[in-house]
Amino acid sequence: MDDLCDGMKAALLSFLFLAFAAPHDFFVSILTIRHSPNTRTLDLTWRITAHDIEHALENVAPLKLGSDKEHPKADSLLNAYFTQHLVLMQQKQLSWTWVGKELDGETLYCYLQVEHIASPKDLLVQNTLLQDVFLEQQNLVHVEGEKLPTRSHTFIQGSRPYTFVW
């Protein structure tokens, strides 16, 4: 019985090592855009694999996110990269304010906010995050509004901008 338990422990440890140490086979970011009618804002939460974004920016600076050696300009470097890879439009191009970030294990959450938005209707989005680094990168975008059903779209390499309509 002990040999069986030891074998199961070894198999589990091998699986965990492969799951967390080996490169992953999927490349996905999830951007959730929530419209808040009370504050008339779009609140963006971007969920990204931390080491993927660090890899994308390694030629700019070593970010070392979440460590005591994190680059002092990590927030502004991330925001500048987002500016290159995210377009939001509603009659004109929208700009956002960087709110912050947090790291949860290997997942990086970045928070942005767009002010003075009456409704998320007819929001045009283009999302090419990490597609300059990973050809198989997929970027899911969910747009949520009060009393509106959530709309979603997946951006892959070569995708055109997408307009969220209700």
Image (spheres, rainbow, N blue to C red):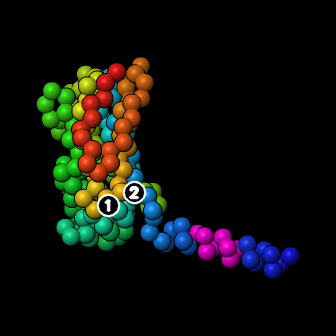
Q: Is residue 102 magenta?
A: no
**Furthest residue toward left:** 92
Is disc 2 in contact with disc 1, using a CB cutoff of under 8 Å?
Answer: yes
- At 24% from the left edge and 41% from the top edge, which residue is drawn? 160
- At 28% from the left edge and 62% from the top edge, which residue is drawn? 133
Magenta region: 9-16
Mark yes or no: residue 150 visible: yes
Q: Tell me the residue that label 2 is attached to.
A: 27
Is residue 142 or residue 62 the one in the foreground? 142
Find residue 153 and report its horizontal and vertical position in percent: 36, 37
Query: In the rendered view of the protein, which quadrant contains the C terminus?
Result: top left
- At 21% from the left edge and 70% from the top edge, which residue is drawn? 59
Q: Dot 1 lies on which element?
A: loop
Query: In the rendered view of the protein, which quadrant contains the N terminus?
Result: bottom right
Marked residue nearer the N-terminal end (2 or 1): 2
* Amino acid beneath label 1: Phe
Q: Is residue 15 magenta?
A: yes
Q: Label 1 crowding class (10 Å Cα cut-off): few <14, some 14-19, many 20+?
A: some
Splitting the image into 4 quarters, where does residue 17 fall?
A: bottom right
Find residue 60 and report its horizontal and vertical position in percent: 19, 67
Res 134 label:
1
**Furthest residue toward right:** 1
* Amino acid beneath label 2: Phe
In the figure, 47 relative to 16: above or below? above
Find residue 66 and report its horizontal and vertical position in percent: 37, 64
